[in-house]
Image: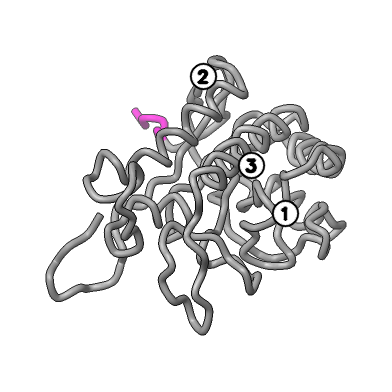
Amino acid sequence: MNTPSLLFSPYGIKGVSLKNRIIMAPMFVGYADPDGTVSSLVLDHYREMAGSGVSMVVVENASVDPSGSGSPFILRVDHDRYISGLAQLAKTIHDQGALAFLQINHAGRYAYLRERLATSPLKTGKIVPREMTHEEIQRIVDGFAEGARRVKEAGFDGVEIHGGTGYLIVQFLSPRTNHRTDAYGGALENRMRFALQVTDAVLEAVGKDYPVGYRFGDGHCIPFRDGRDL
């Protein structure tokens, strides 16, 4: 007797049901309009991806603050004016029979702007970003929360916090990019503070019954002579 493949069996996540266990992971393609709105190319791309048979599509990272865009062609969730376009994107994915999640992010030192905010003022290419003040840190925490609220309001089935691939959350976590001496630097429990504040704020903004994912990067993917990692 043939045993059904676990890969094609249903799976539940916090009140939503996946028809199988195949998920499209978020991958940046840069198809958004220059103002961060959803373009027809974005809709065409995700319509095709959602129609491939996957149970869920996780849309590529959307910026939670104007200072955090990694490209001029990145989706944005930092203002209510983006909700209508995102709602159209969520509906496009749903119409193909897939669930829709949206990843939210701040690029930190990897933003494309000349004046960049980061955990610490470490040279990135030819630019030295400015170390974030406590007020700016709180603004970005609030930005993640408000961005998650907009994701939910737009009709997505869940939201994912981007805590990987070297972006702002990782820049706080890693001792290689976090040279702060305040409550956000030094010991691991301090370097974790920003990530935990973002997570708590997002959970509060969307409610306990709304699915929240967290993309966690546990390494630099670069060999270092001293062997240190996060």
What is the x, y in percent for residue 137? 52, 45
What numbered label is drawn on residue 145? none
| The stretch drawn in magenta includes residue 2 | yes
Q: Is residue 91 visible?
A: yes
Q: Tell me which residue sits at (73%, 50%) in the image.
A: 76
Name the magenta segment's main secondary structure. loop
Q: Amino acid at mark 3?
A: Leu
**Circle 1 or circle 2, nearest the eye:** 1
Considering only order in the chain, which callout, 2 or 3, is on the residue closer to the N terminus? 2
Q: Is residue 92 visible?
A: no
Magenta segment boundaries in residue numbering: 1-6
Q: Amino acid at mark 1?
A: Leu
Q: Which residue is mark 3?
A: 102
What numbered label is drawn on residue 14? 2
Q: How packed is label 3: few (under 14 Cα within 10 Å), some, or many (20 or more)?
A: many
Q: How packed is label 2: few (under 14 Cα within 10 Å), some, or many (20 or more)?
A: few
Q: Is 48 placed left or right of 9 in the picture?
A: right
The kind of secondary structure element at disc 2 is loop
Q: Report, in whole angstroms, how far the alpha carbon at label 1 lies from the one at label 2.
A: 26 Å
Q: Quadrant of the C terminus?
A: bottom left
How many numbered dots are placed on residues in this image?
3
Considering only order in the chain, which callout, 1 or 3, is on the residue closer to the N terminus? 1
Looking at the image, which is closer to me, 129 or 153? Answer: 129
Q: Tell me which residue sits at (50%, 23%) in the image.
A: 13
What numbered label is drawn on residue 75? 1
What is the x, y in percent for residue 226? 12, 70
The kind of secondary structure element at disc 1 is loop
Q: Is 189 placed left or right of 112 in the picture?
A: left
Kindly indicate whether the residue at mark 1 contacts the one at mark 3 (C-beta within 8 angstroms). yes
